[in-house]
Image: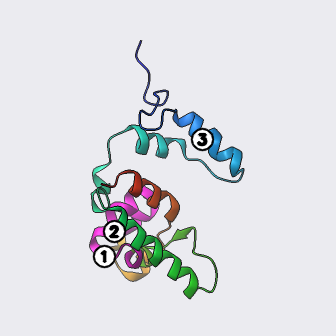
Amino acid sequence: MTESREERRLSFIDCSVEQIQTAITTEWCDWKFNRDFWTTILTGEAAPEFRLVGNRTLEFWIRCYNRWQVLGQRLKSKAPGKVDGLELEQILSCPRHRLKDICKLFDHQGWKRLETEGMSGPALGKIKVPVVSLFTAGVLLSQ
């Protein structure tokens, strides 16, 4: 009997995606758990679009986290849950042209806009990437 990807227990944590969802939503009732996203991250192959941030070191992700927190201080509030493409460029400290792949994974509509409008500042300003999801996926795929 073969288990589906979704039902398969995750060998590195010995639980299923469903159990992770239950644990998270029990603690944070308002969390919008994206089951497809997490099933892909935890049981699938990394998307080629993730190559910009895949296999980065934990040190890289700590630096990104710190830059994200500084962004919140500049805004005189807590760090934002979603960032636009310009903020993402600062957080990841990467060339602008490399952001398109990340946008494709985390804001498909925004990615379509970038395809038609180009990688201009105004177009990047309309992108919305969920930072916690990006960081979590990055850490799980890190070296």
Q: Determine the residue positioned at 50% across, 72% down.
A: 83
Q: Earlier in the sequence, mark 3 or mark 2?
A: 3
Three-letter code for the amino acid on which mark 1 is drawn: Arg
Query: Is the C-beta separation of discs 1 and 2 under 8 Å?
Result: yes
Q: Is residue 27 above or below residue 75?
A: above
Q: Can you tell which of label 3 and label 2 is closer to the viewer?
A: 3
> Would residue 101 be counted in the magenta stretch?
yes
Residue carrying label 3 = 21
Q: Quadrant of the N terminus?
A: top left
Q: Is residue 58 above or below residue 120?
A: above
Q: How would you classify the magenta stretch by its main secondary structure?
A: helix
Query: Is the C-beta separation of discs 3 and 2 under 8 Å?
Result: no
> Would residue 108 be counted in the magenta stretch?
yes
Query: Is the C-beta separation of discs 1 and 3 under 8 Å?
Result: no
Q: Is residue 96 above or below residue 75?
A: above
Q: Can you tell which of label 1 and label 3 is closer to the viewer?
A: 3
Please report the bounds of the magenta region as a residue range: 89-114
> How many discs mark residues in the rendered view?
3
Three-letter code for the amino acid on which mark 3 is drawn: Gln
Residue carrying label 1 = 96
Q: Secondary structure at mark 1?
A: helix
Q: Which mark is residue 99?
A: 2
